[in-house]
Amino acid sequence: MGRIEVVDIGNVKPEEPLCNGRYTVKVNRAEIITKDNGKQSLSLGMVVLAGPTQPDQSPAEDRRVSDFFPLNGYETMKDGGRYSKQKLASALVAAQVTVDTDGFDNDEFIDKTFDIITKIKDDLDGVPQTNVTRYLAQA
């Protein structure tokens, strides 16, 4: 293996999670991910266009946020997938993605703009993460 030179990484600090609030975002990635066990998820990558100034006084604009939605395996979830289904439905409505009897095309999410509500929540390792709790269509 070769050695890779990394220039000026000493001044880089990890971004803190987005503070709780409402943000306008634009989708730049919408992928279907299939795990080894056959479970599928929709993974959305979004860029913040507008939102509150962060606690460290940095702007929210151009920050990245992502979310995922299980697409199957609901029967193994505590609530039978009710919360996951509702969250996916709200994202589809907010992004104005067409849903028909065959489902939806994940590529329709690309370049769509809508609002999200975030809340900081610890992950399984106790590390604070940005959690998208709601998707809202723009007025």
Image (cartoon, helix red, strand yellow):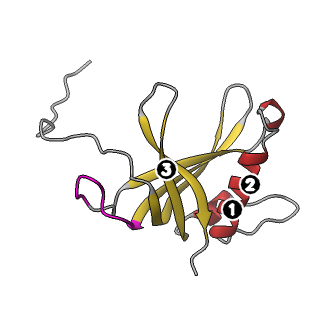
The answer to whether the residues at label 2 and label 1 have Cβ atoms under 8 Å apart is yes
Q: Position of residue 108 (x, y in %)?
A: 64, 66
Q: CA distance from mark 2 to mark 3?
A: 17 Å
Label for residue 86?
2
Residue at disc 1, secondary structure:
helix
Residue holding disc 3: 119
Left or right: 90, with 48 as reference point:
right
Q: Residue at x 85, y 59 (%)?
A: 102
The quarter of the rendered structure image containing the C terminus is bottom right
Residue holding disc 1: 90
Left or right: 117, with 80 as reference point:
left
Residue at disc 2, secondary structure:
helix
Amino acid under disc 3: Lys
Q: Nearer the viewer, residue 88 or 119?
A: 119
Most distant residue in the bottom direction: 139
Is 26 drawn above or below residue 55 in the view shown? below
The answer to whether the residues at label 3 and label 1 have Cβ atoms under 8 Å apart is no
Q: Residue at x 24, y 58 (%)?
A: 58
Please give the range of residues in magenta.
Answer: 49-58
Left or right: 35, with 129 as reference point:
right
Main SS of the magenta part reads loop
First in sequence: mark 3 vs mark 1: 1
- Mark 1 residue crowding within 10 angstroms, few (<14) / some (14–19) / many (20+): some
- Mark 2 residue crowding within 10 angstroms, few (<14) / some (14–19) / many (20+): few
Q: Does the magenta run of residues contain 94? A: no
Q: Residue at x 39, y 52 (%)?
A: 18
The quarter of the rendered structure image containing the N terminus is top left
Q: Position of residue 131 (x, y in %)?
A: 51, 47
Amino acid under disc 2: Gln
Q: Residue at x 77, y 32 (%)?
A: 78
